Structure formats: structure tokens, C-alpha cells
């Protein structure tokens, strides 16, 4: 762990930035936090609204066990204290998108207490320094609805589809010191949530958004006054907000002014933050325990089930890929950065080991290299993601098995892969149909080698005179003569023998 | 046929089963009484067709040889705090005037499913806030009782379930639902010479009842006899997964286990309920009640509930705090009243809607509740009140180590004249002094008639039981009922 050296150069010297993030993550669940209504994104307005969500008279909230379970699992994934006893509070304020006139949240006794997340500033650089960011708490709460101002010239419309959807508010400590750290934290948090399956992490659909708290100080001094920029919805924007807001604050302070504690909004088009409201007109939310709900009292069996259901988490996975599978730090980091990639890779690995009757460790390197270079290259070219890849893990494993057992060479494998992408065919059939099986027939190869050496007498002389680099040339020519179908190992041996 | 409306729920049920009369005859008789009693203003909406519908269904089922349901043939009144599908539900407020729910409250649904029919939606204090029924937007209910002095002053039927109490004592319905937050079943029952029980908090589902104060609100029956209360409570109670505070317990057979034999039971008399200056007639009735319970075999012991004097202030912090939040949903956005002045913005709409939609007492409680929850005052009021509430509960726990039930007066006075206390909210709040402690502790408590005062007005006795021990409360109520011989009824003037 190293201290950040990120500094803003002001007229009066260097300034340090202090950052804390409050991340709202929508809990993956079929139903809302306190009602049975559905939660799918993109539905027609007001089609996913129960009587409870619309706050009809006499309606009561009933906690959705699955939402609680997901928040507990998330807490466990960040090594946090799980509070077996927690309680819901009402946050009271009036707004047209808030039917109850209060949001059910957890102020006094949150479900999850202190935890931590380790970030790496450059995930792909094994030498990059790591830093532990503290998590203050995670609590669960209801989302509000959405106001639509563009449907009518003088009226606003309300869509309550999101009203009552479960959110986790994940509050970090003010432990970040640079835009890069804030970005790395948010990326890592997103990775963990997607691994756990408690949030889909789709920031463009609003499933995850961050309130960014920023203050500046002279290094070593006490914390300065902070501002909170609301609802920032991408890693890039979070970094931009920190950068912009920190230099704005430095300018204010160096001009002899004071930073006002206030809520601000980020405008991505103009890349600036604007004041929304100051502390003076802040709401008095009149928090108090929700009398419609009993405290949450979690038993050991429930917690144990949550723990058992946790998948292997990214840090553990990355270290296993390095230690047990022998992958490079770079490959291990890349493959584990996203739950879907790791899942795909492990399917490829399992299938490869099964077909080749080898251990996963024995097929890991070739699988990783193929996925990260061949498959990723192809997907990039096609503008597709792993999710809609035309070639699945099973098909990939078949292809790699043909290389591993010497049926085809690496060069031929590239051709076969191209055909698979185009036709959706499977590697063994393509190799058979196109006659691409490589040969280990020493007679045929010997003949080819003899022909190549005879045609290149001058080069043979040079080689024998010590220009050993020409060995590759003979191999290439022989392979070319064999139309790429010769077993390269056999070719190597036979050329060596012929030249000795 | 006119005497059908003098029958109790048990008598109607049994007479219908025996074939003494049809369900339709019963419904018609009560519908006629309801229609003839407009002067009492007990109903906000009358639903004679619903009563007939249920009666006809009961008669048809009987003719087809089907087994009767628990309340087949029995029409009842429904307090207009229960949401009823297809029938306007207002909580006696202008805010919800014209609001017709698309859903049925759990308690009312249980009653209809048990065969009961609805005579109409009964008037109440607005959002159940009041002790005299004077806060109703639809005009106050007038008690059928009048003072013997012949002054003909219009009297309060009690509140908030004043429509229920007036309708039952005037024979407009044999029974009705009530809700009790701080005494809203018990005090009106006492004022009108009937019985009513607030069960243990969590016995009856709150789902579909317009909320006043969630941690205190509890539905319960009101009727002329203890047995009728037992019958109705059995139907109204039961676990409801839609209410997180509902108790997941089987419903006891209260009616079958009714017994006025109190041998082996100890009755606690809390000394704090007999302050200096307690009305002498109330005090004397209480003494008679003690003797009746002794006569039924119970042993009487004095107990102490030392934090009683803090109950009223505690209640008037907690109930308004919860109400201020529960009533925030009435904002003019989705249903009910909306007042949108020309060119108004959202805040203006809130202000106009809530100014017009809520009456003065509701506004007063919203303001008190908002104040006690606000930053800087929360700990001094709300947190402190919660601590005192715990102490009040502990008082009862300690008292119940020495006894099985408590006997107290229900209210500090008989019914008062309408308008008499309206100008002084504190005097009005004092009406709840004996009922509020059991509400804060969530305990079952019942009012039964104890006799008449010198003016000829009913006085009520209150029995408070241990949590979940409604049976002992009902049994003690039955013992009093048998001995009090309360047969007085208001002379018909309406």
C-alpha cells in the first residue's frame, strides 16, 4: 500500500484531494423491496406498480427476503460486519416521485457495517500498487419513481415503475486521494457486485450511480469542507467530477473564498458541476423507525446460507489463476476483471480438460492465450461481446484440443477459427471436410525437407557457417511446401537431422 | 318483526340457523332502522343493497342445504376507516371524499367471507383523530343518548369510533367494526352503553385500514354483548402476511371458551387510576365492578403502574409523530383531493391540497408530529417518548406478576355535550387518560357497561389483560355483564 502522490498545483502550493463515494446499486431481484411488483428495466410507464408502490391508503410494506439476502451477500463479499439486528427508518420529504411521502431506508441501524475493498490502480500492471479503501456501511432502501417533464407543455408526468425498487447504498470512507483511485474503486465495486450477482452494474440503465463527495486540503491538514455531486453514472464521469470539483474548490480557496457545503449536479456535456442546493435549504428528513416494519433479525442459518452461496471473488480468483493455473499476472487480472469473462474462461477450461483428459492447469495457458488474443481479437473486429460470441466455450475447447493433440497446427487453427466464426461450424468437422489435419508422416516431410535444402544450397552453406537464424527459414519453407499441415515438431526434428 | 333489531349477533346467527327468520328479514329490518336514523348522522355511506346481497346469499345457501358460515345472516356496520372495494372510503376526511378503493381490507374481507353483510360505512373522527366525533368532515355523529334532565343537549357518542357506538346503541346494527389507537373503541363503547374490545396489537391485520399511528392502530369489534364481541373477534383476527406486524398465531376459540367463573383469577386494581378528584360516580361504579368480580370468584389485589401519569404525553408524541408521516401520502398527486390553483407549482399544490383536505385537528397533530421528529427536538421528544413507552410496558409486566387482569374505569366521565370540549384540545385529550396506557403497551383491553350515572348516561368499566390473553378479558367482561344487568337503552327521539 502506498500513499497517493496526486496533487493539484495551486498558486499557493500543492493541494490534496479527499474523496468518498456513496454508491446506489439496484439489487438484482424479481420483485421490489417491499412489494411483489416486478422490476424489469424499460417497461411501459406505470405498468410495474402495486398498491403498495403507489402508497394507496392502508397499504403496508413487507420486506422481500431476497433483497435482504443480496445485500448480506454483498456485505460478506467486501469482508464487512453483518448486523444480525437492523431496522428500517423513514426518511420524510415531499416530492411527486415519492408516493409515500417518505423513503424507507436505514439510518440508525444499517444491515451491513464496516468492510473494505482493495483496489489496484492499474489492474493490468502486476507491479501497480494496491490500496485498501474502507467501507463505512451498506444499507438497503427504496428507490423513488421518475418524473417526466417532456410529455406535456404545462404538466409533468410520474412513472412509478422504479418506485420501491430495492437499492443498496454503499458508503465508502473518505479514503480516496485521486481521480484514478475513485475510478478504480468504482470499477472494483462494480466487479464485485457482478460477481456476487447482487447488482447487474449497468450504469447506463441507472442500476448503479454514485454520489461523489469531494474536498481539498493542504497535505497533512484537517479535512476541508466537502461538496456532494449527485447521481454520477459512469466511472469516467466520476473521475471527471473529482478532477473538476477539486480544481474548482482550489480556485475558490485560493481566491480567498470558502467552499460551501452543498449538493451539486454534474453536466457531462459541459464537463462541469453546478450547485443544486446548499446546506441552508437542506431538508429536515425527520428520520424515525418505520412503525410498519419489525426490526430485521437474521438467524445463523440464513447467514450461513448467504455465505455458502457466495461465488469465488475476484481477488481470490486472480490469485488462484496465477498460483494454480500458472497464468501471468496480466492474464489473470484481465480474465478476472469481469465475472462474465471469468465464467466463460472457466467453462472453456473445464471443457478443454474434459476433452483432452488433462488437468485444468495443463490446458490453462493455451486457453487463456486463445481467449485473450484470438477470441477477443475476433469479437472486437465483429463488434460483439463475449455474451453474444458466435463461438462458445465448448466449441473453443474443441478447437484447442485439436491443436494440443497435434491434429492441426496453430497456424491451421487460426484458419479453422475464422471458418467457425463465419459458418458457425465446429472445428473437428471443418478439419475433416477441408482436409486440414496435419501430417506427422516422416516420409512426406523428409521429402519436403530434402527439396527445400536442395533448392537453397547457399542458405545451407551460410547456416553451416554459423548463421543459425536461418533455421526458421527452412522450417517456414518446409511448412509452406506441406501447405501448413506438417507437424511443426516433426519438421523441426527432421531439419535438424538433415543439417547435422 | 320490529324486534329483530333488538337481537344480538348470537341470537341472529342462531335464529337464522334455526329458521326462525330469514337473513333477508334481518337485513331489511336493520336497513329500515338505518334509513330512519339520519338525525344521528352515524353513517357516511349507507349500503342497504350490500346487506341484502349478503342476506340473500345466506338464504340461498341455507335453502341449498349448505352449512352456515360463522356470520351468515348477520349484517354489520363498517367503520369508514376500513377500505372497502367499490364503496367510498373517506376516513371521514374531505381529503379522501370520493375515493373508492379497488381493494378490500383484510379484516372487512374476513367478515364478508364469514357471511356478514354491510349496512354501510360508519362515521368517525377524521383519520380517527378525536374523542367526540366532532372532527368528521361529514358532520358529527349525535349520540342517541340524552341526559335525564331533559335538556335535550346533543351528546358526543365518543370517538373515534362514534358512528359505530351510536349505531349499535340505537339498534341500527347489531355490531360494528372499530379501530382503537388510544381508546377509539373503548371510550365510545363506554359513552353509549355497549361493549368493545381492542385485542392484542397484531391480532388483527392492519392491511387496508387507513393508517393513523401504525404502532398503536388495532381493529376490534363493538357490540352489545361480550359474547358478540368474542364471535366477531374470532372472525376478524388471524395472521396476515401482508402486514409485517401481524402475529403469526392461531386464533383461539374465544366464544366456546367463554366463562364467567373467575375463581383462581387475581384482579389488579391500579392505584394510579384513582387520582384525587376522580368523578365520584365513576369511582363508585368502579367499586361496584370490583365487587362483581369478587362475586365471580376472583381475588382482588392492589397494584401499581407508576408511569401512568406519563402515558398521555407519551401517546401525544408518538401517535402524532407516526401520523405526520403516515398522512404524507395525501398529497394530491395520485388520488383523493387535489387543489391546483392557476399557475401553481408542485409545492403550491401540496399546500393548497392539504390545507383544504385536512381538518383542524388533523393539521394540529401533523404539526405536533412534524415538530417532535424535527432535527434538534427528536431526542428530547420522540426518543424520550419511546423510552417512557418501554417503562409503561414494564409497569404492566410487573403488575401482571401479581395478577391476571386489571380493572379500571374506561373514561374519566360520561358523555359530554357536543361543542363542550372542542375549544380546548387538552381537555379533549384527557378523555383518553385511562385507555392510552394499554394502547402503548399493545395489550388487549375491553370496555363493558358498568351502569348509569345520575343523569342517566352510561358509564364503562375497562378490563386490561396480558398480551394474547383476550380470553381472560372476555371472561371478566362476561362476569361483569351478568352482574351489572345493564339493560338501559336510549329512548328513540330521532
Image (spheres, helix red, strand yellow):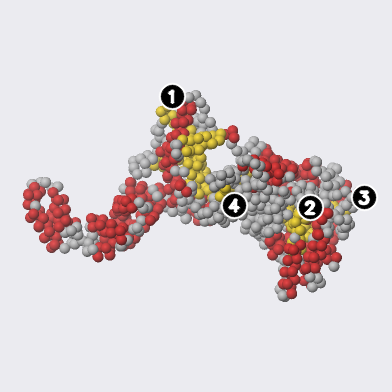
Q: CA distance from mark 3 to mark 4?
A: 55 Å
Residue B257 horizontal/vertical position (percent): 75, 64
Q: CA distance from mark 4 to mark 1?
A: 53 Å
Residue B259 in view in this figure: no
> In what quadrant of the picture does the N terminus of chain A appear?
top left
Q: Residue at x 72, y 41 (%)?
A: B364
Q: Which is more toward the observer, A296 or A392?
A: A392
Q: Which mark is residue A53?
A: 4
Q: Are marks 4 and 2 on the same chain?
A: no
CB contact under 8 Å: marks 1 and 2: no
Q: Which mark is residue B314?
A: none
Disc with the residue nearer the chain's start (4 vs 1): 1
Residue A384 horizontal/vertical position (percent): 36, 53
Residue B102 horizontal/vertical position (percent): 65, 58
Residue A117 horizontal/vertical position (percent): 44, 44
Residue B87 in view in this figure: yes
Helix, strand or loop at label 4? It is loop
Q: Are marks 4 and 1 on the same chain?
A: yes
Q: Residue at x 73, y 54 (%)?
A: B80
Disc 2 designates what residue? B162
Disc 1 designates what residue? A12
Q: Nearer the viewer, mark 1 or mark 2?
A: 2
With B366 as the anchor, is B292 left or right in this view? right
Q: Chain of mark 4?
A: A
Amino acid at each position: 500500500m502506498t500513499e497517493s502522490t496526486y496533487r493539484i498545483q495551486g498558486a499557493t502550493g500543492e493541494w490534496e484531494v479527499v474523496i468518498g463515494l456513496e454508491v446506489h446499486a439496484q439489487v438484482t431481484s424479481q420483485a421490489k423491496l417491499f412489494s411483489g411488483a416486478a422490476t424489469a428495466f424499460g417497461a411501459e410507464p406505470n405498468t410495474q406498480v402495486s398498491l403498495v408502490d403507489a402508497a394507496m391508503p392502508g397499504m403496508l410494506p413487507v420486506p422481500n427476503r431476497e433483497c435482504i439476502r443480496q445485500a448480506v451477500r454483498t456485505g460478506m463479499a467486501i469482508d464487512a460486519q453483518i448486523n444480525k439486528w437492523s431496522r428500517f427508518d423513514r426518511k420524510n420529504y415531499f416530492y411527486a416521485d415519492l408516493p409515500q411521502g417518505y423513503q424507507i431506508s436505514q439510518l440508525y441501524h444499517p444491515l451491513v457495517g464496516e468492510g473494505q475493498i482493495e483496489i489496484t490502480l492499474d489492474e493490468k500492471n502486476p507491479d501497480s500498487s494496491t490500496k485498501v479503501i474502507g467501507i463505512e456501511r451498506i444499507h438497503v432502501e427504496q428507490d423513488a419513481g421518475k418524473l417526466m417533464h417532456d410529455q406535456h407543455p404545462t404538466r409533468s408526468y410520474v412513472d412509478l415503475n422504479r418506485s420501491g425498487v430495492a437499492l443498496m447504498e454503499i458508503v465508502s470512507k473518505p479514503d480516496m486521494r485521486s481521480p484514478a483511485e475513485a475510478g478504480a474503486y468504482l470499477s472494483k465495486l462494480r466487479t464485485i457486485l457482478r460477481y456476487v450477482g447482487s447488482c447487474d452494474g449497468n450504469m447506463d440503465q441507472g442500476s448503479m450511480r454514485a454520489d461523489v463527495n469531494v474536498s481539498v486540503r493542504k497535505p497533512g491538514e484537517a479535512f476541508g469542507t466537502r461538496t456532494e455531486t449527485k447521481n454520477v453514472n459512469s466511472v469516467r464521469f466520476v473521475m471527471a467530477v473529482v478532477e473538476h470539483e477539486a480544481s474548482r474548490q482550489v480556485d475558490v480557496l485560493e481566491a480567498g473564498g470558502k467552499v460551501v457545503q452543498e449538493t451539486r449536479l454534474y453536466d457531462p456535456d459541459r464537463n462541469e458541476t453546478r450547485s443544486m442546493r446548499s446546506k441552508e435549504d437542506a431538508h429536515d428528513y425527520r428520520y424515525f423507525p418505520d412503525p410498519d416494519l419489525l426490526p430485521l433479525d437474521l438467524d445463523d442459518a440464513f447467514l450461513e446460507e448467504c455465505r455458502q452461496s457466495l461465488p469465488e471473488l475476484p481477488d481470490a480468483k486472480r490469485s488462484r489463476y496465477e498460483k494454480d493455473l500458472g497464468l501471468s499476472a496480466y492474464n489473470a487480472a484481465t480474465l478476472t476483471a469481469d465475472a462474465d469473462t471469468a465464467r466463460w474462461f472457466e467453462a472453456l477450461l473445464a471443457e478443454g480438460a474434459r476433452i483432452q483428459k488433462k488437468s485444468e492447469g495443463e490446458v490453462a495457458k493455451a486457453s487463456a492465450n486463445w481467449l485473450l488474443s484470438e477470441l477477443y481479437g475476433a469479437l472486437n473486429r465483429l463488434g460483439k461481446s463475449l455474451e453474444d460470441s458466435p463461438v462458445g466455450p465448448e466449441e473453443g475447447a474443441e478447437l484447442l484440443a485439436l491443436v494440443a493433440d497435434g491434429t492441426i497446427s496453430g497456424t491451421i487453427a487460426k484458419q479453422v477459427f475464422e471458418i467457425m466464426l463465419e459458418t458457425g461450424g465446429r472445428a473437428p468437422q471443418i478439419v475433416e471436410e477441408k482436409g486440414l489435419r496435419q501430417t506427422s508422416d516422416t516420409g512426406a516431410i523428409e521429402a519436403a525437407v530434402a527439396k527445400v535444402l536442395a533448392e537453397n544450397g547457399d542458405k545451407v552453406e551460410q547456416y553451416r557457417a554459423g548463421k543459425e537464424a536461418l533455421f526458421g527459414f527452412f522450417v517456414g519453407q518446409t511448412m509452406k511446401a506441406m501447405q501448413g499441415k506438417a507437424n511443426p515438431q516433426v519438421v523441426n526434428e527432421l531439419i535438424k537431422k538433415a543439417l547435422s | 318483526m320490529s324486534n329483530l333489531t333488538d337481537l344480538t349477533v348470537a341470537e341472529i346467527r342462531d335464529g337464522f340457523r334455526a329458521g326462525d327468520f330469514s337473513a333477508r328479514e334481518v337485513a331489511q329490518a336493520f336497513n329500515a332502522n338505518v334509513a330512519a336514523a339520519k338525525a344521528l348522522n352515524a353513517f357516511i355511506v349507507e349500503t342497504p343493497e350490500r346487506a341484502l346481497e349478503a342476506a340473500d346469499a345466506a338464504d340461498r345457501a341455507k335453502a341449498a342445504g349448505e352449512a352456515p358460515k360463522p356470520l351468515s345472516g348477520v349484517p354489520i356496520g363498517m367503520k369508514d376507516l376500513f377500505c372497502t372495494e367499490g364503496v367510498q372510503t373517506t376516513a371521514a376526511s374531505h381529503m379522501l371524499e370520493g375515493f373508492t378503493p379497488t381493494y378490500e381490507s383484510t379484516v372487512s374481507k374476513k367478515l364478508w367471507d364469514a357471511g356478514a353483510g354491510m349496512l354501510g360505512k360508519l362515521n368517525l373522527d377524521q383519520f380517527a383523530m378525536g374523542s367526540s366525533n366532532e372532527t368528521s368532515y361529514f358532520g358529527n355523529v349525535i349520540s342517541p343518548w340524552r341526559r335525564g334532565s331533559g335538556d335535550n343537549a346533543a351528546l358526543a357518542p365518543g370517538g373515534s369510533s362514534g358512528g359505530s357506538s351510536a349505531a349499535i346503541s340505537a339498534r341500527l346494527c347489531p355490531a360494528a367494526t372499530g379501530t382503537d389507537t388510544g381508546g377509539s373503541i373503548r371510550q365510545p363503547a363506554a359513552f353509549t352503553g355497549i361493549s368493545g374490545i381492542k385485542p392484542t396489537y397484531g391480532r388483527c391485520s392492519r392491511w387496508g385500514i387507513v393508517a393513523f399511528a401504525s404502532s398503536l392502530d388495532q381493529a376490534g369489534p363493538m357490540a352489545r354483548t361480550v359474547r358478540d364481541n368474542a364471535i366477531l373477534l374470532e372472525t376478524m383476527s388471524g395472521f396476515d402476511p401482508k402486514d409485517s406486524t401481524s402475529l403469526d398465531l392461531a386464533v383461539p376459540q374465544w366464544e366456546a371458551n367463554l366463562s364467567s367463573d373467575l375463581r383462581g383469577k387475581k384482579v389488579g386494581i391500579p392505584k394510579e387510576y384513582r387520582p384525587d378528584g376522580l368523578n365520584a360516580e365513576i369511582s363508585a361504579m368502579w367499586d361496584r365492578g370490583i365487587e362483581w368480580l369478587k362475586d365471580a370468584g376472583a381475588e382482588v389485589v392492589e397494584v401499581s403502574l407508576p408511569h401512568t401519569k406519563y402515558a398521555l404525553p407519551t401517546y401525544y408524541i408518538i401517535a402524532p409523530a407516526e401520523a405526520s408521516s403516515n398522512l404524507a401520502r395525501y398529497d394530491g398527486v395520485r388520488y383523493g383531493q387535489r387543489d391546483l390553483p392557476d399557475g401553481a407549482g408542485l409545492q403550491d399544490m401540496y399546500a393548497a391540497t392539504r390545507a383544504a383536505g385536512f381538518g383542524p385537528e388533523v393539521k394540529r397533530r401533523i404539526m405536533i408530529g412534524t415538530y417532535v421528529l424535527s432535527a434538534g427536538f427528536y431526542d428530547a421528544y420522540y426518543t424520550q417518548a419511546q423510552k417512557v413507552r418501554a417503562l409503561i410496558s414494564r409497569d404492566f409486566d410487573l403488575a401482571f406478576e401479581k395478577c391476571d387482569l386489571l380493572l379500571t374505569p374506561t373514561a374519566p366521565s360520561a358523555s359530554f355535550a357536543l361543542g363542550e370540549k372542542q375549544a380546548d384540545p387538552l381537555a379533549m385529550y384527557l378523555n383518553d387518560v385511562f385507555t392510552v396506557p394499554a394502547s402503548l403497551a399493545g395489550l388487549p383491553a375491553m370496555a363493558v357497561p358498568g351502569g348509569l350515572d345520575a343523569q342517566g348516561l352510561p358509564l364503562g368499566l375497562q378490563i386490561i389483560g396480558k398480551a394474547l390473553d383476550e380470553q381472560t378479558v372476555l371472561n371478566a367482561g362476561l362476569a361483569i355483564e351478568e352482574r351489572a344487568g345493564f339493560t338501559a337503552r336510549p329512548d328513540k327521539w330521532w
